[in-house]
Image (cartoon, rainbow, N blue to C red):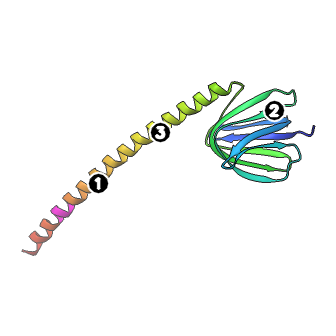
């Protein structure tokens, strides 16, 4: 069986695997598989699990919140904000869900902070406009 290289990239770095037999992932239209020698392609992966089989026949799982897959020149590249790699799919899905929940919580806190800053700036601008109006009136007298 013809093999290919797999490169996983995220915000923390990259990992490369040689002699991959097959890859199974999913996009908006459903699951698909890739074997060595596949034609070039680019797809948007959906949230969930993908998997690949190494030369020894072992399957490895990748949990990701979506990403971009590109196959060209017998090399498969998967780019995601983050991914979790391992051999136990249930554990990986739990890690991904926990990470996304943490990110959502941090994003919510950041939005609240930005809203407070916005309100503070609006108050200061209103105060400055009020004081500026008085100063201008005082200069004209």
> In the orientation shown, which residue stands out farthest toward the right?
1
Q: Nearer the viewer, mark 1 or mark 2?
A: 2
Q: How far from the left and from the top, in percent, is residue 117?
A: 32, 49
- SS of the residue under disc 2: strand
> In the orientation shown, which residue stands out farthest toward the bottom?
140
Measured Cα–Cα span from mark 2 to mark 3: 32 Å
Q: How far from the left and from the top, in percent, is residue 8?
A: 72, 39
The quarter of the picture where residue 79 lies is top right
Q: Name the residue under label 2.
A: 53
Q: Name the residue under label 1.
A: 121
Segment colored magenta: 128-132
Q: In which quarter of the image is the N terminus?
A: top right
Q: Which of marks 2 and 3 is in front?
A: 2
**Relative vertical location of residue 95 with respect to residue 79 in this rendering, above or below:** above
Of pointers 3 and 1, the one earlier in the residue sequence: 3
> In the orientation shown, which residue stands out farthest toward the front?
30
- SS of the residue under disc 3: helix
> Which mark is drawn over residue 140?
none
- SS of the residue under disc 1: helix
Q: Name the residue under label 3.
A: 104
Of pointers 1 and 2, the one earlier in the residue sequence: 2
Asked whether, in this view, residue 120 is left or right of residue 21, the answer is left
The quarter of the picture where residue 22 lies is top right
Residue occupying image coordinates x 78% and y 34%: 52
């Amino acid at each position: 069986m013809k093999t290919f290289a797999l490169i996983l990239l995220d915000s923390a770095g990259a990992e490369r695997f040689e002699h991959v037999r097959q890859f199974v992932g999913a996009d908006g239209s459903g699951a698909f598989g890739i074997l060595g020698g596949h034609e070039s392609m680019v797809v948007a992966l959906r949230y969930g699990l993908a998997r690949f089989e190494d030369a020894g026949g072992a399957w490895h799982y990748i949990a990701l919140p979506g990403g971009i897959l590109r196959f060209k020149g017998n090399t498969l590249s998967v780019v995601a904000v983050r991914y979790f790699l391992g051999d136990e799919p249930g554990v990986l899905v739990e890690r991904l869900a926990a990470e996304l929940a943490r990110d959502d919580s941090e994003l919510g806190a950041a939005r609240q902070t930005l809203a407070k800053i916005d309100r503070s700036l609006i108050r200061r601008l209103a105060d400055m406009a009020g004081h500026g109006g008085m100063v201008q009136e005082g200069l004209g007298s």
